[in-house]
Amino acid sequence: MSGLAIDDAAWGSAWRTRSPADKLLLSVGLVVGALVLPVWPGTLLVGLAAVALALGPARVPARTFGRAVRLPLAFIAIGAVTAVVEVGGGGLGWAPDAAARAGALVGHGLAGSAAVLLLATTTPMSDLLPELRRLRVPAAVVEVASVVYRLLFVLLTSLTTIREAQTARMGHSTVRRSYRSSGVLAAAVLTRSWDRARRLQDGLAGRGMETGLRVLPEALPSSRPFVAATVAGLAALVAVTLAVA
C-alpha cells in the first residue's frame, strides 16, 4: 500500500510517543500566536519556533517538512496577489498598502501553516482521532475525518497501480500520450475509488456497522515538563513580540 510522506514522518517522529493532547496544546498555541500576534516579529518567531521544533526535537526529515509546506505556500502566494490588487476607474492597479497587506498575509499564513504541519508530522491520525473524541469534538466531524483519511490510501493505491500500468505500456513516452494518459488516469482513479468505497460501505452495513468504527487507542500519558515548557515557550514568544513591537 502506498503511504503518505507526512504520515510516515509522524510514525517515525521522536515525538510519536508523546501525548496527542500535549502536542495539540503546543500546535494550537502556535496557531493562535500566528493569527493574533503582529507580523513583526510575532509571526516570524512563531514560524521559526515551529520549524525548529519539527526539525530539532521532533526529528522530522527536513525534506518531508519542506515538501509539505509547498502547497500551503502556493495558496498563500495566490491569496497575497489577489489581496494587493484593486480595481479602480483606471482598471487594475496595486493597492496603496500593497506591501503591508502582502507581508501580513504571507507572515500569518506561513507561521500558521508551519504550526499545523508540526502537529501533522508528529502525530499519526490513529492517535489524533481518539484524542478529538476525548475533547468532545462532534462525533460526525471525527467520523468524516476518519473516512477521508482511509480513502486517501485507497486513492494512492489506485493511482500508483494505474500509473505503473500506463508507464509499462509507454503511456508517457510523448507529451501527447502523457496528456491522454493523465486524463484516463484521473477518470480511472475516481471511478475505482468510488467503487471500492461503495463496497466498503456495503460490507460494513452488512455487518450491522451503524455507528463509528471504534478502536482501542494506545495510552500515551501527558508529560508535565512538556506542558510546562510549552506554556513557558508560548509566553516567551508573546513577551518578546510585545517588547519589540
Image: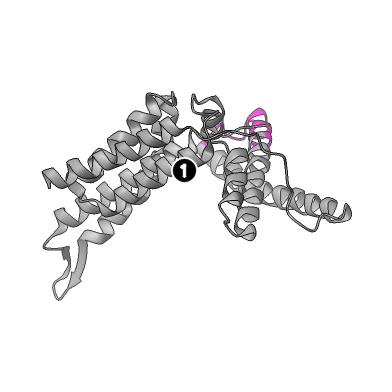
Residue at label 1? 24
Look at 34% across and 32% down and name the residue there. 51
Quadrant of the rendered image containing residue 8 = top right
Look at 61% across and 32% down and name the residue there. 3
Percent position of residue 164, x then y: 65, 31
Left or right, 60 with reference to 39: right
Q: Residue furthest front?
A: 224
Residue 69 visible to an observer of this rendering: yes
Percent position of residue 107, x then y: 25, 47
Percent position of residue 68, x then y: 43, 37
- The stretch of residues the image draws in magenta is 161-174
Mark 1, other Cα within 10 Å: few <14 / some 14–19 / many ≥20: some
Q: Residue furthest bottom?
A: 89
Q: Nearer the viewer, residue 17 or 110?
A: 17
Left or right, 206 with reference to 171: right
Left or right, 232 with reference to 97: right
**Quarter of the figure with the N terminus:** top right
